Amino acid sequence: QVQLQASGPGLVEPSQTLSLTCTVSGGSISSGGYYWSWIRQPAGKGLEWIGRIYASGGTNYHPSVNSRITVSIDTSKNQFSLRLGSVTAADTAVYYCARGGDMAMTAHFDYWGQGALVTVSS
Amino acid sequence: EIVMTQSPATLSVSPGERATLSCRASQSVSSNLAWYQQKPGQAPRLLVYGASTRATGIPARFSGSGSGTEFTLTISSLQSEDFAVYYCQQYNYWYTFGQGTKLEIK
């Protein structure tokens, strides 16, 4: 059973960088066949996909955050990470990590982490 | 960006009755459509993918249908644990989610 767990600081000051790590257990992040994504959800609102990474290190980002986001992977630790720079209050949200297939028909998100609440405030 | 529109925003149904949730895509997403259930304080849970295939461990009372731009999630006989928010998501071209339908007890 694959499990994902997001972790990181819960409070970030405006204009600083948000950093989160997702630790994957029950399967190897480097085995291929999957993209590893970050999805966020502001309080009381819907879900927004913001970025993904493949085991090879290839990344894709949502245009709304493209200039501020970096997703990286550490296969030795079975982890992938999110960095989002120049944050504002609009970036306050629960951030989820999730696994999706690497083919069009399997790209749904089958495993999710429990979510990490990040508040941007001084 | 493909826009996903769910209706209704809130659906009030009595336990044991049927619930029908709708999702429309702004352009065809083929059958690359998933449904998720989310309860307060929890991560979304995959219910259906490929528009109509139930995920592992999902009860048979959940069924999905549709293709192209119109999709439906039906819950045949509502149980107490089914009252939650439901999201549709397309993964035909990147990923976008609907705004959600809150299924509440009538």
Image (cartoon, rainbow, N blue to C red):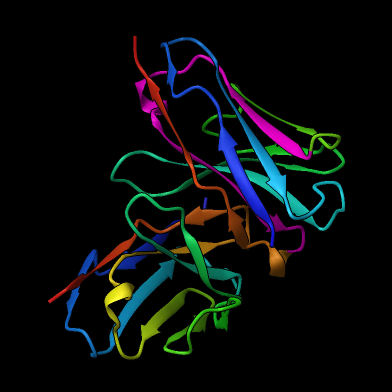
- Name the foreground residue: A15 vs A117: A117
Q: Is residue B42 left or right of residue B8?
A: right
Q: Is residue A75 left or right of residue B82?
A: right
Q: Is residue A102 left or right of residue A5?
A: right
Q: Is residue A114 left or right of residue A11?
A: right
The answer, for residue A73, to whether it is visible in the render is: yes
Residue at x 55%, y 70% (from the top left corner) = B33
- Quadrant where the C terminus of chain A sits is top left
The answer, for residue B28, to whether it is visible in the render is: no
User: Percent x, y for residue B52?
Assistant: 55, 83
Residue at x 12%, y 77% (from the top left corner) = B106
Span colored in magenta = A78-103
- Quadrant where the N terminus of chain A sits is bottom right
> Magenta includes A92?
yes
**Residue B74's quadrant in the figure?**
bottom left
> Magenta includes A99?
yes
Residue at x 39%, y 71% (from the top left corner) = B23
Above/below status of A31 relative to B47 = above
Above/below status of A45 relative to B54 = above
